[in-house]
């Protein structure tokens, strides 16, 4: 017989060895297992409910089923892990203990809400069920307990409707069919002469429930379940299934949320905002999410449930009015507001319910905000010491800084415009476009090249496609936290909601405000900053920031500009990457410098020849049959080039200017139609057939892989020579100005794949430089480098760097050549690739890190290995994409170069990359 100690030891070992069952269910309330840091596992909502419960805020108890369950559910053919059932039962027991109620009890029933909660909030995209646990018997118990039959049957009616819709799939069958439950409810309201749901009597609600249950039976053949555990099973399953519904998938694609994350499910004790006039429910932001102002902002409805506020069925009251309606609760909410901001260090968007005078917190999350609000909140919260400067910089989505540069209505045009009505300003900026009433029409019109404003009574997630396509969104119902407002804000769309003075009639295809009637296809203009709606098209004008930058407005007059300038200053302090611009003209360059560009990273010289007569000389040069003819054409081009470079150098005032030598895929410049060929023939004094024959001779099957880039300069060294001469002569001119301006040309050879190609071209550039410097008696500070835009260049970068003073990654071509996907034609299949998650992001917009990105890294390392001082930049479109900018920072590049309007985005993204990498 083993001794006592041995037995104990054995037990201990056994305990140690027994695999710990995975915890799938986390409680919150009096007993709280999780916290705010556990977002990946508990979802944003679950983690923050736990956090709120732990800091003593009044959170009704409940439990969170983890995102792991969702992941396993999908992995195992929509089957739950075996341990889940028992863990849910245990969690229900805890709720029962804490509340003193019992799930499914006929005397004191416990009711739950069941909500989704992904790692990142996806407002309105997944399903929610309230009042779960009611059935024909428990509803009577709820009636007896509350002493309020109307209330009890109101809850039951809502539950049957939600459950029928979400779990049992009883929904509108076409876009134009009304929601069947809403339709039945509306019909009964008409029959009994009631307009507001809360005026329905107990008997009315019983009748609606009867009709709802009959509807469910008729549509599904099954009965609405009376067993509360079955109800819970169904609801949890519906939430997990909604992770893969069409709108959630679309939303994830738009915001780059991986499908593998899954959603959590939050099951929480119901509290009732619809218990009578001492109850209410609402949503609030700790600051104004539209403009960022530090005011308590939100709305509520008395005697209602949460969904009523968000769905926009009744137009809610502004939160300030709660101070009169329920002063005690308003005061409590003010305390909560401060506590939330202090604790979470950011603006919070929260839901609350007041049940018979007692305040409950149902959710909190970082508030979605417009670009303008993001900037203002970051700046002001930093000044209030609620945020650090570094946090402030990372809190502004880099892309959104560009919304401060969005157009506003032209001041003169707006004075003449006809004001139709005013709604709630929900997404700032000015939009003007054709009126459309549904998502498919919006998409169709945009496809035709028209701007549209999507006009809906209220929007639902089904309208998402239309909202993405539209320039502006206008709704006649719903408040600032309605779906339209939330989604539009996040998309940075111009939006007005709750414009109750206008009548939107889908059937007649009209919008009416007083005597003004607009029809589908007419123009409408909306100002999402003021809420004003105008009939007709109104011209737009640049934003305040742009006006200050263009010297048309004083900086002191524009708080928006001051906020922008502050954030940019902080960004510049933290970023390590330089930010340049891709510009081909002095106007573009100046605009970019005003936005913070530190140089030109790419001047595409062939673009200088698109205008006026120049294209003719360019064509003359390309089509030249021999060297003599080419030299003649080049002679004509030289003065243009010199003048253009002179302009650029002056505009850039000593900042580096990277001039790329000719890289025209020939087809872009050849005269394609008869008219263009005839006029070129006249200009050259030859027969049109000569031109046609030459065009034919130059035809290439794959012009992008053809006679372009350095291949042109190698075939025709006189082209390189002319361009080098134009650059150096312009530099000499500028250096010799009375008011001398520094110049720093960086000459860039395109499409190099072999060191010898580069050597060949570099030799010409140096020779011409020497000649010009000698002839003009100046010393020019210049560099010669190359683009890395074909895989061979990246692979042999160590060799190539021996002949280059800098590399600039041309990731447009590098993507094209690495992926073997035409940058011009890939659009025809990329949509499918995105849908199938093969390429969730367009690789021509956001760098394909594991493919093209690896080549960039190879290029960086190779280049540095033989030329430690090599400058490294990027000038493909990716240089203005936040995610790609972060990649560039981490890859060790010196600078990014992007289009002028993206410069602020790149500056901010670069700072965020540096902060994140240092954190
Ligand atoms: C590139 O290929 O990334 C590049 C910048 O050059 P272009 O777009 O002119 O081909
Ligand atoms: Mg290129």
Image (cartoon, grey):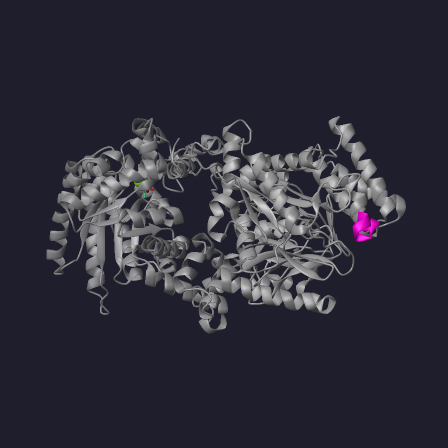
Q: Is residue 11 above or below residue 323?
A: above
Asked if residue 253 lies left or right of residue 743, the reply is: right
Asked if residue 180 lies left or right of residue 352, the reply is: right
For this rendering, which residue is in front, 144 or 609?
Answer: 144
Q: Which residues are magenta?
A: 143-151
Q: Residue at x 40, y 30 (%)?
A: 1
For this rendering, which residue is in front, 765 or 195?
Answer: 195
Whether residue 191 is visible to the viewer of this picture, yes or no, is: yes
Which of the 4 quarters of the picture holds residue 911? bottom left
Asked if residue 841 lies left or right of residue 892, the reply is: right
Q: Residue furthest right?
A: 192
* Percent x, y of residue 372: 51, 60
Dominant secondary structure (helix, strand or loop) of the stretch shown in magenta: helix
* Percent x, y of residue 467: 59, 45
* Percent x, y of residue 22: 48, 37
* Percent x, y of residue 910: 35, 54
Magenta stretch holds residue 147: yes
Asked if residue 821 lies left or right of residue 275, the reply is: left
């Amino acid at each position: 017989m083993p001794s006592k100690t041995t037995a104990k030891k054995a037990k201990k070992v056994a305990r140690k060895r027994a695999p710990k069952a995975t915890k799938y269910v986390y409680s919150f309330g009096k007993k709280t297992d999780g916290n705010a840091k556990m977002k990946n596992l508990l979802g944003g909502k679950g983690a923050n409910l736990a956090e709120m419960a732990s800091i003593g805020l009044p959170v009704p108890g409940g439990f969170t089923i983890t995102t792991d369950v969702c992941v396993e559910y999908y992995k195992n053919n929509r089957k739950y892990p075996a341990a889940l059932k028992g863990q849910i039962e245990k969690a229900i027991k805890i709720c029962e203990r804490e509340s003193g109620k019992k799930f499914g009890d006929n005397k004191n029933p416990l009711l739950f809400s069941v909500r989704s909660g992904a790692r990142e909030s996806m407002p309105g995209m997944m399903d929610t069920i309230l009042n779960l646990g009611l059935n024909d018997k428990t509803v009577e118990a709820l009636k007896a307990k509350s002493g309020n039959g109307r209330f009890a049957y109101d809850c039951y009616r809502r539950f049957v409707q939600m459950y029928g819709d979400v779990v049992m799939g009883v929904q509108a069958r076409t876009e134009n069919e009304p929601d069947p439950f809403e339709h039945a409810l509306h019909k009964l309201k008409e029959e009994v002469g009631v307009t507001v749901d809360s005026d329905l009597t107990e008997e009315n609600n019983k009748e609606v429930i009867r009709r709802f249950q009959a509807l469910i039976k008729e549509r599904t053949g099954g009965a609405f379940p009376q067993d509360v555990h079955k109800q819970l099973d169904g609801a949890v399953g519906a939430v997990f299934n909604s992770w893969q519904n069409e709108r959630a998938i679309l939303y994830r694609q738009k915001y780059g949320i991986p499908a593998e994350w899954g959603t959590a499910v939050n099951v929480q004790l119901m509290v009732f905002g619809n218990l009578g006039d001492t109850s209410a429910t609402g949503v609030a932001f700790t600051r104004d999410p539209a403009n960022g102002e530090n005011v308590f902002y939100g709305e509520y409805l008395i005697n209602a449930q949460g969904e009523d506020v968000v769905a926009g069925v009744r137009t809610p009251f502004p939160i300030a009015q709660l101070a009169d309606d329920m002063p005690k609760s308003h005061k409590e909410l003010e305390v909560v507001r401060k506590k939330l901001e202090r604790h979470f260090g950011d603006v919070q968007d929260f839901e609350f319910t007041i049940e018979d005078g007692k305040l409950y917190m149902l959710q909190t999350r970082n508030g979605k905000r417009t670009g303008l609000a993001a900037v203002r909140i970051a700046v002001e919260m930093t000044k209030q010491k609620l945020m650090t400067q570094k946090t402030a910089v990372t809190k502004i989505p880099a892309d959104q800084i560009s919304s401060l540069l969005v157009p506003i209505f032209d001041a003169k045009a707006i004075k003449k415009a006809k004001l139709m009505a005013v709604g709630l300003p929900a997404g700032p900026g000015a939009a003007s476009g054709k009126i459309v009433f549904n998502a498919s029409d919006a998409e169709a019109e945009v496809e035709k090249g028209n701007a549209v404003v999507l006009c809906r009574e209220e929007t639902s997630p089904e309208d998402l496609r239309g909202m993405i396509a539209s320039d502006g969104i206008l709704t006649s119902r719903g408040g600032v936290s309605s779906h339209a407002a939330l989604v539009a804000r996040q998309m940075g769309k111009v939006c007005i909601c709750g414009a109750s003075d206008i009548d939107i009639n889908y059937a007649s295809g009209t919008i009416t405000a007083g005597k003004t009637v607009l029809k589908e296809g007419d123009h409408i203009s909306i100002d999402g900053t003021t809420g004003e709606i105008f009939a007709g098209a109104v011209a737009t004008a640049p934003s305040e920031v742009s006006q200050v930058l263009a010297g048309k407005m004083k900086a002191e007059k524009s708080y928006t500009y001051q906020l922008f300038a502050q954030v940019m200053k902080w960004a510049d302090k933290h970023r390590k990457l330089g930010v340049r611009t891709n510009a081909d003209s002095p106007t573009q360059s100046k605009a970019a410098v005003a936005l913070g560009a530190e140089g030109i990273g790419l001047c595409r010289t062939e673009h200088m020849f698109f205008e006026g007569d120049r294209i003719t000389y360019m064509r003359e040069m390309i089509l030249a049959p021999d060297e003599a003819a080419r030299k003649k054409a080049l002679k004509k081009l030289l003065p243009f080039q010199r003048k253009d470079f002179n302009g650029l150098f002056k505009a850039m005032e000593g900042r580096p200017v990277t001039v790329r030598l000719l890289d025209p895929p020939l087809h872009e410049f050849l005269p394609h139609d008869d008219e263009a060929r005839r006029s070129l023939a006249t200009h050259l004094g030859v027969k049109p057939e000569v031109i046609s024959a030459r065009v034919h001779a130059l035809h290439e099957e794959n012009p992008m892989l053809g006679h372009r880039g350095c291949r042109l300069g190698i075939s025709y060294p006189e082209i390189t020579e002319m361009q080098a001469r134009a650059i150096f002569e312009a530099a000499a001119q500028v250096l010799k100005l009375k008011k001398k301006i520094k110049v720093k040309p960086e000459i860039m050879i395109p499409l190099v794949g072999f060191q010898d190609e580069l050597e060949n071209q570099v030799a010409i550039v140096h020779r011409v430089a020497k000649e010009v410097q000698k002839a003009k008696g100046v010393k020019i500070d210049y560099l010669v480098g190359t683009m890395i835009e074909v895989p061979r260049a990246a692979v042999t970068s160590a060799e190539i760097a021996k002949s280059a003073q800098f590399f600039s990654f041309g990731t447009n071509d590098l993507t094209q050549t690495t992926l073997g996907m035409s940058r011009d034609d890939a659009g025809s299949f990329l949509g499918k690739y995105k849908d199938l998650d093969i390429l969730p992001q367009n690789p021509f917009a956001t760098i394909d890190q594991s493919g093209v990105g690896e080549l960039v890294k190879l290029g960086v390392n190779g280049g540095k290995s033989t030329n430690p001082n090599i400058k490294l930049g990027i000038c493909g479109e990716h240089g203005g994409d936040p995610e790609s900018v972060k990649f560039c920072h981490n890859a060790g590049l010196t600078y990014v170069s992007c289009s002028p309007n993206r410069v602020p985005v790149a500056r901010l993204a670069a700072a965020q990359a540096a902060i994140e990498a240092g954190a």
